[in-house]
Image (cartoon, rainbow, N blue to C red):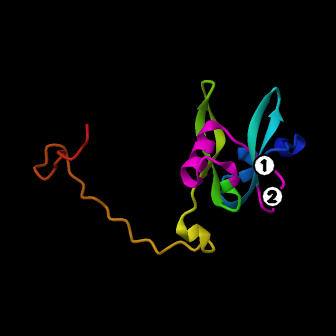
Amino acid sequence: MNINEQFPSKFLKAADLNGSQIVVTIKDCLVESIGEDKRPVLYFVGKEKGVVLNKTNATNIQDLYGPDTDDWTGKKVVLYTAYVDFQGRSVESIRIRKPKDHELNGGNKPAQQPAQVPPQFEPGDPGADDSDIPF
């Protein structure tokens, strides 16, 4: 039994993403009562649940599309999960970022070049150069 299914929420939680990243289109941003607070909630086209915006996610969207939430309608963002510090613990949270070009074009990633392996040196090897290490 998945305990998250036993306590459904009106709002999207990190566990709902199952570790995936999804591109969504913003439908609306409404101010709603969350407990005793009023918070902006972002809703998406074709999705039932909204994301309660925190300062980080609101700022990320503002940096992309401006401070007026009316201008966010119809814009695309990526929802993904990341671990953040919260009350002294590391917890999984929803984060929001700009979609990359390949994510807007059907999800086909551009071909990646093979990673180049840097040469390995032993300590004291005259070929080792640490002058570009920034600390």
The residue tagged 2 is 47
Mark 2 residue element: loop
Q: Which residues are magenta?
A: 44-70
Q: On the picture, is 34 further left or further right than 26?
A: right
From the top left corner, tell me how far across and down residue 119 is, in percent.
24, 58
Q: Residue 15 got which mark?
A: none
The residue at 66%/55% (across/down) is 71
Q: CA distance from mark 2 to mark 1?
A: 8 Å
Looking at the rendered structure, the kind of residue marked 2 is Lys
Of residues 41 and 23, the one nearer the viewer is 41
The residue at 85%/44% (across/down) is 10
From the top left corner, tell me how far across and down residue 35 is, in percent.
83, 29
Q: Residues within 10 Å of mark 1 (few under 14, many from 20)?
A: many
Q: Quadrant of the C terminus?
A: top left
Looking at the rendered structure, the kind of residue marked 1 is Gly
| Farthest right residue in view | 6
Q: Are marks 2 and 1 in contact (CB under 8 Å)?
A: yes
Q: On the picture, is 123 further left or further right than 2?
A: left
